[in-house]
Amino acid sequence: MAGSEHSGFSAANAALFEGRRWFLTPGPGASAAQTSRIELLVKSFGANPAFADADAHDRIMAAVSALPQVTASALMAVVGQRVDEEGLAMSGPGLRDTTRLAGSAATWMTDGLAHNSREVADAIDALISELRLVRDQLERRSARAISLPARRHGVTR
């Protein structure tokens, strides 16, 4: 995974793939020699090849790429509906860090979302489920009952 929310020639970066993961999903007809050549090419860019079958690739990409993109965009839409420019100016770095992807050119995501729609929809459903749990806790107005999803699942980065 590589890149940023910036696109175009001005965002070019010679070290873009340095130390980044690059999925290789050889099909059933791929020979060992072909796979080895592609692996060497990926390594020549400074990337770290990771092998996966197509289904695992799609599930992972839905969770770690498409879901953050869609979530950042939806979050920024909600913020934009609820606060004006003055209110937005009151935000700290947390909002910027959380919504950075909302500024991405959406065109590159369109194909990925369309071709992986089932996995992305499943990931969105899982996020909605987590948000509903927090919402239910808030409706009960019990501060002790509020458990943020990442902490509840022991997953932080």
Image (cartoon, helix red, strand yellow):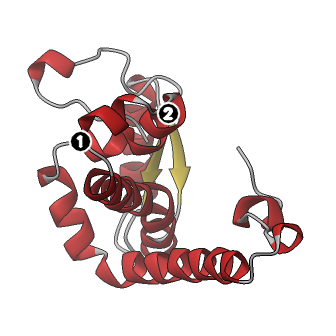
Q: Position of 129 compared to 10: left or right? A: right
> Which residue is located at x 20 percent, y 20 percent?
11
Percent position of residue 142, x then y: 82, 74
For mark 2, give the secondary structure. Answer: loop
Residue 4 in sight from this viewpoint: no
Percent position of residue 78, x then y: 33, 60
Percent position of residue 3, x then y: 34, 33
Residue 33 in sight from this viewpoint: yes
- Residue assigned mark 1: 104
- Residue assigned mark 2: 20
Q: Position of 25 compared to 7: left or right? A: right
Q: CA distance from mark 2 to mark 1?
A: 19 Å
> Which residue is located at x 70 percent, y 43 percent?
157
| Residue sitting nearer the eye, 17 or 155 | 155
Which of pointers 2 and 1 indicates the residue nearer the eye? 1
Residue type marked 2: Arg
Dividing the picture into quarters, in which one does residue 84 lie?
top left
Numbered label attached to residue 141: none
Percent position of residue 30, x then y: 36, 64
Q: Position of 140 compared to 32: left or right? A: right
